[in-house]
Amino acid sequence: MKPKVIAAFDKLILRKRSIIETINDQLKNTFNLEHSRHRSLRNFVVNAIACLVAYSYQKKKPSLNINHADLLPFVQ
């Protein structure tokens, strides 16, 4: 494969990919966030928000540790 130039923001996010995957895994398996076919959009949104609220009450959460100074070059 030819080497590609990756943007700085993409490099920052790629370093945090394992943490993001861990959070997605917890939401799917622990808090039962599902892809199933919902009968209405409202039902899907209520299910997703309920999972996020339950996740927010979790005592030990992984964090991305992205500082404001890290994001300054990307803000215009």
Image (tube, rainbow, N blue to C red):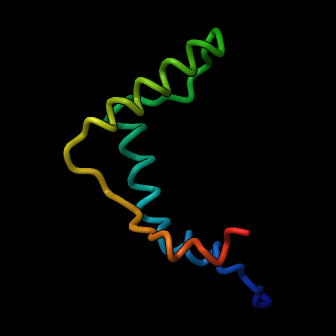
How many tags in the picture?
A: 0
Q: Eyeballing the image, is 32 above or below 47? A: below
Q: Taking 54 as reference, is 34 left or right? A: right
Q: Taking 8 as reference, is 14 left or right? A: left
Q: Nearer the viewer, residue 2 or 53?
A: 53
| Residue 74 image position (x, y, % from top left) | 67, 72
Q: Taking 14 as reference, is 60 left or right? A: left
Q: Residue at coordinates 74% horizontally, 69% vertically from top-left? A: 76
Q: Residue at coordinates 65% horizontally, 10% vertically from top-left? A: 40
Q: Taking 40 as reference, is 1 left or right? A: right
Q: Residue at coordinates 43% horizontally, 65% vertically from top-left? A: 18
| Residue 65 image position (x, y, % from top left) | 39, 67
Q: Nearer the viewer, residue 73 or 53?
A: 73
| Residue 52 image position (x, y, % from top left) | 41, 33
Q: Quadrant of the N terminus?
A: bottom right
- Rendered image quadrant of residue 6: bottom right
Q: Residue at coordinates 42% horizontally, 37% vertically from top-left? A: 28
- The residue most toward the top is 39
Q: Nearer the viewer, residue 17 or 7?
A: 7
| Residue 45 image position (x, y, % from top left) | 56, 21
- Rendered image quadrant of residue 35: top right
Q: Eyeballing the image, is 6 above or below 49? A: below
